[in-house]
Amino acid sequence: MGKLEKILVILVIGSLWGALELFGRDIMRAMGVPQKSALLFGLGIIILYASKKLVDFPGSVTIMAVIAGLFKMASSYFFPCQFSAVVINGIVFDITYLAFKDRLDASMVFRAIAAPVIVYVSYATFALFATYLLREGSWVERGWEGVVSYVRYDALTAALITIVTIHLGYSLARAVKPLAQPRTTRMPAMAFRVISVALVAVIWVAGQWFVN
């Protein structure tokens, strides 16, 4: 897979992640589903893990997170802290995978241990950032107690979900890994580029249509 193809894959996956966050959150909100962020975190891990078998270089998931965060800005219920949350999730996953790639890929037990660690670090970092750096209204109002409550209760739910979904991400990663190998898809490079650009355009247009 060439550099241009990797860039396109990043754009596609980042857009898909953003669509999951945008559509998923708004649909679950309309349905009255509790713990929306926990469910979205767990589902997002599937995408992130699989992406590492297509474009595995330091910072790839962080770039996807920025794209996903920008996509979420189309939401009618968008708050700046939501962009921050997605980017923080991406950074934490990137660092974890970079540090423990071989162990994560080799051991189901290690993945089960790593999943809640990723969740708690992401949730704690975000809560502290939103409260003391971003100083988002509701977070500042709740202060330290809000941070503790968020990590204690919301992160627990996300951790339990992610312990399961991280293995689904690993399975999907194994399934898509051959696509990153030269000549595996037998698709002409130009066709791959056109399809990727078209898919990104469709996702973003759908996102704008969804919120209007």
Image (cartoon, grey):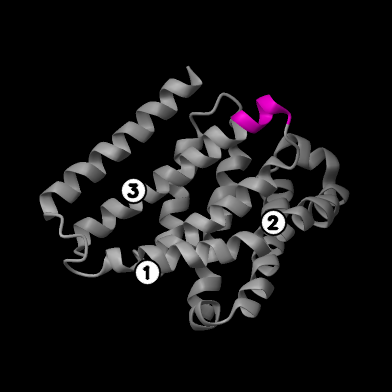
- Mark sitting earlier along the chain (3/2): 3
Residue 1, placed above or below residue 158: below
Which segment is the magenta one? 27-32
Looking at the picture, how far across and down is residue 199, in whole percent? 29, 39
Q: Residue furthest right?
A: 145
Residue designated by label 1 = 56
Label 2, residues with CA under 10 Å away: few <14, some 14-19, many ≥20? many
Secondary structure type for disc 2:
helix
Percent x, y of residue 93:
54, 64
Task: Give the distance between the C-alpha atoms of the residues marked 3 and 1, in whole angstroms.
Answer: 14 Å
Q: Position of residue 134 (x, y in %)?
A: 65, 45
Q: Residue at x 67, y 61 (%)?
A: 119
The amino acid marked with disc number 2 is Ile
Quarter-wise, where is residue 5 in the image? Answer: bottom left
Q: Residue at x 72, y 51 (%)?
A: 127
**Separation of marks 2 and 1 at Cα, in angstroms:** 24 Å
- Foreground mark, 2 or 1? 2
Give the label on residue 161, or none.
2
Q: Secondary structure at mark 3?
A: helix
Say which mark, if any, is on residue 11: 3
Left or right? Give the position of 71 relative to 149: left
Q: Quadrant of residue 184?
A: bottom left
Residue 41 to residue 206: above or below? below
Residue type at numbered disc 1: Asp
Q: Nearer the viewer, mark 3 or mark 2?
A: 2
Q: Who is closer to the viewer here, 193 or 148?
A: 193
Q: Residues within 10 Å of mark 3 (few under 14, many from 20)?
A: many
